[in-house]
Structures are given as structure tokens and as C-alpha cells.
Image (spheres, rainbow, N blue to C red):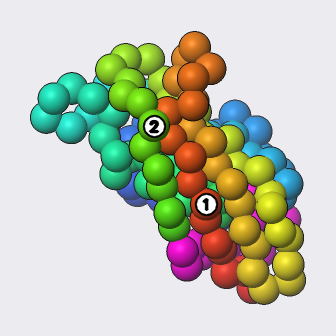
Amino acid sequence: MRIEDSALDVELGAQVVELGRERTVVRYPVAGNTQPEGLWHGGASAVAAETAASLAAGAEGQSARGVSLNVNHLRPVREGYVTAVASAMRLGKRVCVYQVELVDDAGNVVAVATVTVAVK
């Protein structure tokens, strides 16, 4: 998977900062990705988490698709960027599990996610 091939991530302004099977980092602008109150949208957190984990799982050319996603929102963000950092918890031949921390520009954790990705 390439970020350029994901219409939703392109629309959200995603930028890949680091790409590796064990750790992948993807950054998103808050502007344009907010809910009606002007806060970073929880759905954007879900997209960012699944994208970071799927990119990581497929970093060596495998086909990767998210099959389970759990996101806990911890604090609001109104401006700047949100960065999703996917760290491998289990790297299997068919299933990978990632913990994804979403952080704001000050390094505050704004959400945490666990993403299970099918790989083939």
C-alpha cells in the first residue's frame, strides 16, 4: 500500500514520515479534519491509526488490510498536526497487531489504538 493510493488519506492530507514494518509514522493536519466544534475528528483518529498500521504491515510489499480497530480518545486537539506512530506488538505471517499512539505537536497523546491487520 502506498499513501498515494488511498484517496481518503490524500483527502485528509496524510504525510508518511517514517515507514517500516516494526514502526511507521504518519502525520495529518488538524485543519480540514475537524468535527463541528472545531476539534480533531475521532473518525480521523481511526483513519490515521488504521492507515499507519496497514502501511507498517505492508512495508515489505505484502498486501495488508485492517480487520480490527479499537480507538480511545484521550484529549482534544484544535490546531497543528496529529502524528500517528504505529509500533508492532506482533508480527506474524498472516496477522500483525500494532499499538498506535496519536500525538499532537506538543507530544501529548491524544488517542491510542490497537489495530489488527491481515497480511498476505
Tell me if residue 62 comes above or below residue 45 in the rendering.
below
Mark 2 residue type: Leu
Position of 43 with respect to 64 (left or right) is left
Question: Along the horizontal axis of the image, is 69 left or right of 118?
Answer: left
Q: Decide if residue 116 is on the left or right side of residue 70.
A: right
Q: How crowded is mark 1: few (under 14 residues within 10 Å), some or many (20 or more)?
A: many
- CA gap between label 2 and label 1 equals 14 Å
Task: Find residue 64 and report its horizontal and vertical position in percent.
Answer: 66, 74
Q: Where residue 109 sits: x, y (%)?
A: 57, 31
Is the residue 81 above or below the residue 89 in the image? Answer: above
Q: Is residue 69 visible?
A: yes
Residue behind mark 2:
74
Residue bearing the label numbered 1: 114
Q: Earlier in the sequence, mark 2 or mark 1?
A: 2
Choose between 10 and 36: the one closer to the eye. 36
Which amino acid, by three-letter code, is at mark 1?
Thr
Task: Give yes or no for contact between labels 2 and 1 (Cβ–Cβ under 8 Å).
Answer: no
In the image, which residues are magenta?
Answer: 55-68
At 47% from the left and 50% from the top, the residue drawn is 72
Mark 1 falls on what kind of element?
Answer: strand
In the picture, which quadrant includes the C terminus?
Answer: bottom right
6 in the magenta segment:
no
In this rendering, is residue 55 above or below 41? below
| Residue at 61% from the left image edge and 65% from the top image edge | 115
Circle 2 packing at 10 Å, graded few (<14), some (14-19), many (20+), is few
**Residue at the image point whose x is 50% and y is 41% from the top:** 111
Tally of numbered tags: 2
Q: In which quarter of the image is residue 58?
A: bottom right
Q: In x, y percent, where is residue 80?
A: 44, 17
